[in-house]
Amino acid sequence: MNEAFVISILVITIRAGTSLLYATFGAILTERSGIQNLGVEGIMMVGAAASFAAAYHSNNGWIGLLTAVLVGIILGVIHAFLTITMRAEQVVSGLAMTIFGTGLASFMGQRLGPGNSTMVGLQGPSFERIPIPYLREIPYIGEALFNQDILVYALYLLIPLMWFYIYKTRQGLELRAVGENPQAIDALGMDVTKMRFLYTVAGAVLMAIAGAHLSLGYLQGWADNITGGRGWIAIALVIFSTWNPLRAVLGALLFGGINAIQFRMQAAGTTLPSSFLNMLPYIVTILVLVFITWAERNTHRFGTPSALGTPFVREEKK
Amino acid sequence: MKTSKELAVQMRGISKHFPGILANDGIDLDVYSHEILALLGENGAGKTTLMNILAGLYKPDGGQIFLKGREVEFHSPKDAIEHGIGMVHQHFMLVESLTVTENIILSLQRSGMNLHANQVKQRILELSSQYHLLVDPDASIWQLSVGEQQRVEIMRLLYRGAETLILDEPTAVLTPEEATDLAKILRKMADEGKAVILITHKLNEVTAFSDRVTVLRAGHVVSNLLTKETTKKELARLMVGRDILFHLEKKKCKAGNPVLQLEHVHATNDKGLPALVDVNLQICAGEILGVAGVAGNGQRELAEAIAGLRHIDQGKISANGQDITNSSPFKVISAGISHVPGDRIGVGLASNLPVSDNLVMKAYRNPPIVQGQLVKKKSIVQFVDRLINAFNIKTPSSDTPARLLSGGNQQRLILAREITASQGMLIAVYPSRGLDVGATESVRSTLLEQREKGSAILLISEDLEEINQLSDRVIVMYEGKIMGTVDPETTPLETIGLMMAGQPLSAIEKHGKVEQSA
């Protein structure tokens, strides 16, 4: 196994892990506030399609990214309105979001190319790799960590920020509390609805950015089903991370790594059928879920926000 | 330190409607500093509603609130707390996964991002020593006992400078010892000039804790009294509106053969921690065995293990000599054991189904309800009508969904079904929890009636008075172990209290002897 091979695996690990981690962070924020959003896959997909279309037509990657943010806000508000204001079943709303998002993105892919044609195969502007002098000379990891696009670097900043925000600030404390016991937060005079709305929308924005990184950074183009189940892996990663952003980084690297190995093995012309390799991340997801559930039961550690998935209703009598 | 009492809160003409109920009807209430006021009333008398209004949770439909003579209007609990009024709810408003300090920080509503954790911790320790409120600021809430959690709630109010503290049924979840500690803490707070309001329906609490008592009945104030100038009997009459029997007629126990037997039973709780540790007990026909203990010491698991709802890891359970260890609930029922579960609505009823369906839920397999594979509507109607009359279930009709009945009638429904299905064995878990005095009385006499008919009854209750009143023998559970078996007639309450706090009977007796010889 030569150096170049290892480096190429590491590079893809980071690139593939980036969109996973953005999506996972989004889901962590949303779920910590007590709202389940199973629409990650759909939101990522629309984020990817819309940002690519916008970037292509404006010939500007930043406009693409901004579009992803807008997509996140719109879809986030829809999910928040349904689940928080209307108290709809969160699982159903999330699944609807995924089905709707997948369809919408596919439609956009067919029509938003030049002259209402398909976007498949188009070359658009993208976030190019920016090597960081000196750091990228570090053996093995230098190339992987410090020759990446701007969204990867932004993520490096976001990781400590997420951790600091959740565990070291008052707002983070409130976020942890509202997903555990919204009644308590309400009794203390804080606005549960507002907080949940905010984090659901913020989470959806991160999910849409995760999509944008696929079409503008990692894969650089549009293809049907571009997310390939990454949204679902992100949901598994949230559980894997026990809602802790630092552990989410580990998870994203692990799954990004599987993705990279799969990619490389295919390129190396292995005799394994490709469908087996495609299956790998999901097998690992299942194993991880089994392990986490088992570990939770035996250590009675508090991971899952207790109020996750339960709409908040102020206790009025009868 | 009885310095001058000042009028802290005046509520005038407070009214509050809920659909179909007038919870508060023109209530006037005065609360003074340096004083503990008991707000006494039955369930549904409007005590909690009134205090939720004072704490800013509900908006009154009419009436005014004055603090130190100035009129105020609260739009949220936050408003109330800013005016120095804080409430400890019956269900604690704490976030279990966070630490004591973090929970207090949450309640401070400071602006900015900084947590100031060390500063807050310092202040907690100060208040802790000032009011003898022992709490570890770094402990997570889920690690604390209920009594400690309550102290965190009180601490939180003191920290925010509350001058008027409202406690809703504070001793419901405490051991006698913890209740005594709480009384001291509240007294200390009153001495320091706070006004303390205690919502309660327990007469003992009124006499043990308060200086003054306001009695509510059906949304009205019926009386304002000084505690030392009244008696329990008078208070009970005011509260219920009629005389209450404090002693149920109980015939002497004629215990027969052992019916239910547990030998060396071990089981774990939902979290996989030991919930039952080497439990041995037997109940004879015509006997009530009471299980005392603070909630969460294995009582629920004990009932579930017997009812076939919980797997036991070791040991043997037998009924009428038949081994029912880890049998399915169906086999347990067939063995003659009935179960009145502690979670009335969640486990005891299919609450959206009509009263009739709920009543036949255990009888539907057998004739005359079923013939062949078909249920006979006519038999059901007869069966249901008979039970409704026999057990005095007040329901608009047998088609009314069970959830619309009052708590007392729901419990009578469950008792009717379980007693009818029972063949000599009944497990009753918290049978009178949440019921008012009248309903409680009827549930208790039903249990005694069954005992006289020769049933073996396992009674699990948090209410020591109930246990003492009904049981022929009492076992006390602590952390899944049986601390000892005592006779309720001859055993002092303190002994049971000590056992509830984890002292085995053998240790208490030994200690007693040492004292006598010294």
Image (spheres, rainbow, N blue to C red):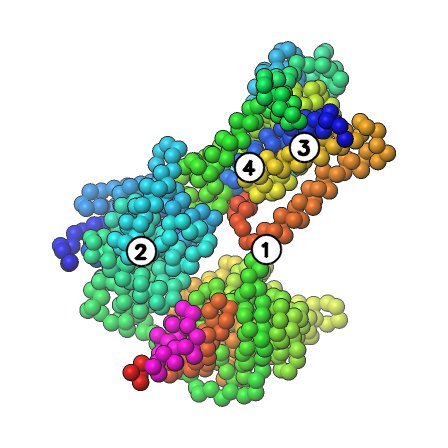
Relative side of A191 to B333, left or right = left
Query: Does residue A93 appear in the picture of this structure?
Result: no
Question: Mark 3 Cα within 10 Å, few/some/many (few <14, many 20+)?
Answer: many
Give residue A19's position: percent from left, percent from top.
63, 28
Badge 2 vs badge 1, beta-carbon distance below 8 Å: no
Residue at 39%, 80% in the rendered image: B509
- Check the residue under mark 2 and report the chain it is in: B
Residue at 76%, 17% in the rendered image: A121
User: Which of the pair A253/A123 is nearer the observer?
Assistant: A253
Give residue B313's position: percent from left, percent from top.
62, 68
Nearer to us of marks 3 and 2 is 3
The range drawn in magenta is B492-514
- Check the residue under mark 4 and report the chain it is in: A
For disc 2, the marked residue is B133
- Residues under labels 2 and 1: Cα distance? 33 Å
Label at residue A246: 4
- Residues under labels 4 and 1: Cα distance? 22 Å
Looking at marks 4 and 1 on the same chain, the residue that comes earlier in the sequence is marked by 4
- Residues under labels 3 and 2: Cα distance? 51 Å
The correct choice, above or below, for B293 with respect to A118 in the image is: below
Question: Mark 1 Cα within 10 Å, few/some/many (few <14, many 20+)?
Answer: few
Helix, strand or loop status at disc 2: loop
Q: Main secondary structure of the magenta part?
A: helix
Residue B278 figure quarter? bottom right
Give residue B475's position: percent from left, percent from top.
47, 76
The correct choice, above or below, for B481 with respect to B34 in the image is: below
* Residue B501 located within the stretch drawn in magenta: yes
For disc 1, the marked residue is A298
* Residue B484 located within the stretch drawn in magenta: no
